[in-house]
Amino acid sequence: MGCRRGGQCLLTALCLWGLCPSPIQSEEKLKGTVGMVITFPTPVLKDGSLQYKGIGSIARVFSGQSRTDYVERFKGRVTWDNSTGLFSITHLDMSDTGEYTVEINEGNNQLKHFPLTVYDRVSKPQVNNSQTRTESDMQTCTLLCSVANGIEVTLSWYREGEEKPLNHSSSPDLSTPLTLPLETEGLFHSYSCVATNPVSNETVRATAGQYCQNTAAAHDTSRRYNIVYAVVFSTAGVLLVIGLITYLRRRRHRHREGPPSSLGSTVTEPLYTEVSHRHRNTERLTQGSQQQDLSELVPSGHPDTPLTTVYDEIRPREQGEC
């Protein structure tokens, strides 16, 4: 049976003699995004295959006809475009990361390697106030930017209008969020926190005053309230002490002077002294005219009531009197 193509017969003969030429190989790195489509840029027009390292062929083309159901995990996701000859994988997942190879069996064999890395989109960073302090007449604030970590995620701070980052950070530990602090200059500059990976980026813009001024004002208000409370309680304490001292002094003074002698004051203990009757009418009292003379003691206009008690001046007993 003769060879239809001279090139194929020559290639077959060389291979039989162990002189089969090595296929032409090249490599191109590809980056994909979760949920998106990746297309391998080497066409297979008639004969060839798409291979995945560790599995083998996941799609093949024979005489311009394709078959793409070799592997269950790629079933329904691998396509071949008969007009362009390009293989594609849809609905990418992180697990699709790996090395793919497009093999071309047309004339000289060609192998094109495509190391593929699938990235998830970065999430939007979050900015919070980490610390606020006052130095001299200027208030400084530390902003803290954080984002969920991922493959090749980098977090950077930029001053508004500048292209060079003020600082940046990345970490291979994907189990913890990525954080980056920034100490601002005053409260009115604008900054941008940018999270990037090879397929996406997210930016949050912030001014120090936006995140720190309210905190600073609340801190000042709290400090003023503390001062007011301290003054009020101190004043109340001083007034309480003054009142207690005044009370004790008055009590001691009353003990030294004795009970008050004013008629309107209340006598707490009875005092006794000898009563001396000095009224001119009572001196004329005689046993025979006692009732008549006593009636003179009744004030004019007073009800005619028998007088049963006589009061006279109470005076202290002088020294030497019995």
Image: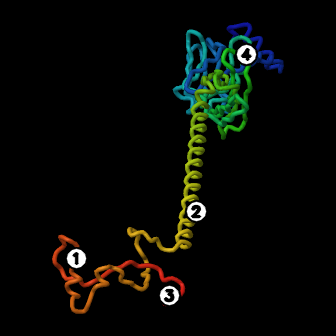
Query: 166 left or right of 146?
Result: right
Q: Residue reaching furthest left?
A: 304
Residue 113 as seen in the image, left or right of residue 230: right
Callout 1 amino acid: Val
Q: Quadrant of residue 314?
A: bottom left
Disc nearest the viewer among 2 and 1: 1
Residue at mark 2: 245
Circle 3 sits on which residue?
321
> Mark 1 sits on what residue?
298
Percent position of residue 156, x then y: 69, 26
**What is the secondary structure assignment of the residue under circle 4?**
strand
At 71% from the left edge and 30% from the top edge, which residue is drawn? 183
- As drawn, the label of residue 110 is 4
Residue type marked 3: Glu
Q: Quadrant of residue 311?
A: bottom left
Which of the two discs, 2 and 3, labels the residue nearer the N terminus? 2
Which mark is drawn over residue 35?
A: none
Say which residue appears at 22% left-offset and 76% top-offset: 298
Query: Which of label 4 and label 3 is nearer to you?
Result: 3
SS for callout 3: loop
Q: Position of residue 99 (x, y in %)?
A: 70, 27
Q: Earlier in the sequence, mark 4 or mark 3?
A: 4
